[in-house]
Image: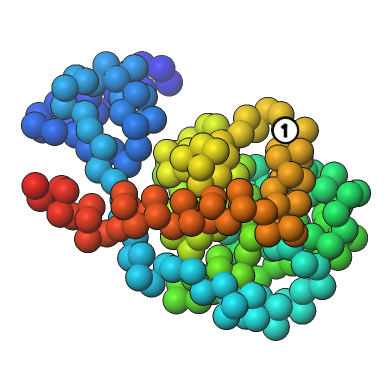
C-alpha cells in the first residue's frame, strides 16, 4: 500500500511542478504542500470569493423567517450549516450546547443542511427540544438563515475552506471555528469570531456562554464583531475584488 502511495505522491508532485504557479484556497494548504516537498516559490493563495450583495445582513427578515419556519421558542440562535455527517464534529457541538443549556435554557441550536448523519442525530438528541433541524435550504434562502442567527458554531476539523463560515460572516454573524482546517483562515481571531482548540470542550462552552451574554445585552463588543465580520468579507473575499486581484 505504501509503495503505491509513494508512486501516486511522486506523480502528483511531478505533475504540479510543471506549472509556473500553484494556487490553493488557504495559507494552511500552502504549508501542507511545503511539508510534502513542493517548491515554496511556486505556491500561493487564491482566495475564494462570495457575492457580498447577496450574502448580506437581513436581520429582521431572517429572524422572522427562522421563527416562522421552525416555531422557535428561545431568544438566542446558534447555527451550524453544512453537511450533516460525523466528520463535521457535530457531537462535539451538541455536547457544548448541552452544557450551555444548564445556564441558558433560552438558547436554540439550529442545524441547517442534510447528510447521512441527520436521521441518527435527530434520534440521538430527540430529548433536547431546543435543537432544531431545517433540512436542505435553497441557496437563495441561506442569507435569511444566517441573518436570523446570532452565532455560527463550526467545530469541523475536516473542511479545506469552510464556505459556510464565509457566508455567515458576510451576513454579519460572528463565528466560532476549529483551529484545525481551512475555516480558521476566514476568521480574524478575536475580531470577527474566535478560533478555538477542538480538544478543549470547556473552552468552547465558556466562550459560547460569554458571547451569548453579549447577544442578550447587545454588548458593544458583539456589535463590533458583527460589523467587523461583514467588513472583512467585503474587503478580502468579495468575488469581484478577488477576480480583479487575480487578473492583476
Where is residue 198 shown, x and y percent of the image?
Answer: 65, 32
Residue 182, by quadrant, is: top left
Whether 4 is drawn above or below 46: the answer is: above
What sort of colour scheme is used for the picture?
A: rainbow
Where is residue 65 shown, x and y percent of the image?
Answer: 62, 80
Q: Residues within 10 Å of mark 1 (few under 14, many from 20)?
A: some
Q: Residue at x 74, y 58 (%)?
A: 217
Judging by the rendered image, the residue that carries numbered circle 1 is 203
Mark 1 lies on a secondary structure that is: helix
Whether 233 is drawn above or below 73: the answer is: above
Where is residue 16 shown, x and y percent of the image?
Answer: 18, 31
Quarter that holds the N terminus: top left
In-image side of 215 versus 177 (left or right): right
Q: Residue at x 55, y 65 (%)?
A: 146
Q: Residue at x 53, y 32 (%)?
A: 180
Q: Is residue 169 visible?
A: no
Whether 12 is drawn above or below 96: the answer is: above
In-image side of 72 versus 60 (left or right): right
Whether 190 is drawn above or below 33: the answer is: below
Residue 22, by quadrant, is: top left
Q: List the single residue furthest toward the front.
A: 220
Where is residue 75 shown, x and y percent of the image?
Answer: 77, 67
Identify which residue, 217 or 109, lies in the foreground: 217
In-image side of 72 versus 184 (left or right): right
Q: Is residue 244 visible?
A: yes
Identify which residue, 235 or 55, lies in the foreground: 235
Amino acid at each position: 500500500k505504501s509503495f503505491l502511495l509513494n508512486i501516486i505522491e511522486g506523480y502528483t508532485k511531478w505533475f504540479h511542478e510543471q506549472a509556473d504557479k500553484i494556487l490553493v484556497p488557504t495559507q494552511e494548504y500552502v504549508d501542507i504542500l511545503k511539508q510534502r516537498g513542493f517548491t515554496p516559490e511556486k505556491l500561493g493563495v487564491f482566495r475564494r470569493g462570495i457575492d457580498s450583495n447577496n450574502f448580506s445582513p437581513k436581520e429582521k427578515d431572517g429572524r422572522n423567517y427562522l421563527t416562522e419556519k421552525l416555531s422557535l421558542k428561545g431568544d438566542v440562535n446558534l447555527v451550524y450549516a453544512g453537511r450533516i455527517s460525523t466528520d463535521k464534529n457535530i457531537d462535539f457541538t451538541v455536547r457544548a450546547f448541552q452544557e450551555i443549556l444548564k445556564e441558558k435554557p433560552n438558547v436554540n441550536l439550529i442545524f441547517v443542511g442534510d447528510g447521512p448523519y441527520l436521521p441518527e442525530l435527530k434520534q440521538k438528541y430527540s430529548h433536547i427540544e431546543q435543537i432544531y433541524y431545517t433540512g436542505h435550504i435553497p441557496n437563495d434562502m441561506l442569507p435569511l438563515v444566517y441573518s436570523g442567527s446570532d452565532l455560527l458554531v463550526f467545530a469541523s476539523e475536516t473542511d479545506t475552506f469552510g464556505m459556510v463560515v464565509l457566508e455567515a460572516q458576510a451576513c454579519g454573524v460572528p463565528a466560532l471555528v476549529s483551529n484545525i482546517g481551512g475555516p480558521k483562515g476566514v476568521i480574524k481571531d478575536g475580531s470577527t469570531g474566535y478560533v478555538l482548540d477542538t480538544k478543549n470542550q470547556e473552552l468552547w462552552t465558556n466562550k459560547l456562554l460569554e458571547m451569548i451574554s453579549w447577544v442578550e445585552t447587545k454588548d458593544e463588543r458583539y456589535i463590533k464583531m458583527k460589523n467587523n465580520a461583514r467588513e472583512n468579507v467585503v474587503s478580502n473575499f468579495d468575488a469581484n475584488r478577488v477576480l480583479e486581484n487575480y487578473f492583476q
